[in-house]
Image (tube, rainbow, N blue to C red):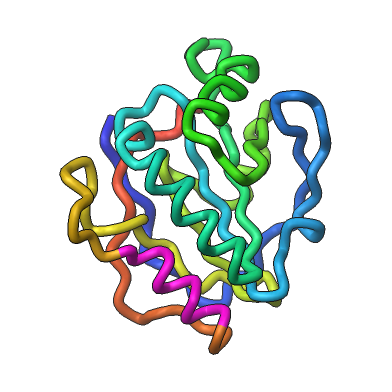
Amino acid sequence: MLTGPPLCDFGWAAPVFELPDASGTVHRFDQQLGPNGLLIAFICNHCPYVIAIADRLAQDARALMDDGIGVLAIMSNDYQGYPADAPERMIEFANKYSFPFPYLVDTDQVVARAYDAKCTPDFFGLNADGLLQYRGRLDDARMGDAAGRTPELVNAMRMIAQTGAGPQDQTASMGCSIKWR
């Protein structure tokens, strides 16, 4: 089902968490928060919206990480009901798209609920204090041709890194609904 997140709640304090990746290594929020902020992407393996942007997400994440911005992705779908999102498939998906960031499993969906994540992809751009400054889309290409795209997420995260605040005008992401238990 197609859905989108609400507008950015500027200054909302992101809940801290620790989650394992698909191999079992635990990652903590405070270890991922970079000196210039943190991007959290709620994604999954089977959503056509995520598949359409996966290469661009990996490319943009590398650029952000080079700028001192932490990046991680969280898979919160019910993978019992959607086996394509199971942890072993997460490893395959991350390898296929050369993700340079941790891809974490939110098995009990507590983190997705705490963040009020709505869809895949759903992006949360946080400043260095862990305060929400961006809840928009990756870029303006959507599922189409990415040639000549405007990298809205990268631009917003760089603004956040420089000023601590995100752009006032943001276009919400769009994707498949999170598959709740």
The residue lying at 57 percent from left, 53 percent from top is 40
Residue 137 belongs to the span the image colors magenta: no
Residue 100 visible:
yes
**Is residue 44 shown left or right of residue 3?**
right
Residue 154 belongs to the span the image colors magenta: yes
Classify residue 19 by image quadrant. Answer: top right
The residue lying at 40 percent from left, 64 percent from top is 153
**Closer to us: 175 or 100:** 100
Q: Residue 131, how many percent across, how many down? A: 62, 73
**Closer to us: 138 or 110:** 138
**Is residue 180 shown left or right of residue 113?**
left
The number of numbered discs placed on residues in the rendered structure image is 0
Image quadrant holding the C terminus, namely: top right
- Residue 79 lies, with reference to residue 26, above or below; the image says above
**Is residue 169 shown left or right of residue 77?**
left
**Closer to us: 21 or 92:** 92
Q: Residue 63, how many percent across, how many down? A: 51, 62
Image quadrant holding the N terminus, namely: top left
Classify residue 164 by image quadrant. Answer: bottom right
**Closer to us: 45 or 168:** 45
- Residue 124 lies, with reference to residue 28, above or below; the image says below
Residue 119 visible:
no
Q: Main secondary structure of the magenta part?
A: helix
Q: Residue 160, how many percent across, how many down? A: 52, 79
The residue lying at 65 percent from left, 75 percent from top is 36
The residue lying at 67 percent from left, 70 percent from top is 130
- Residue 138 lies, with reference to residue 158, above or below; the image says above
The magenta stretch is 151-161
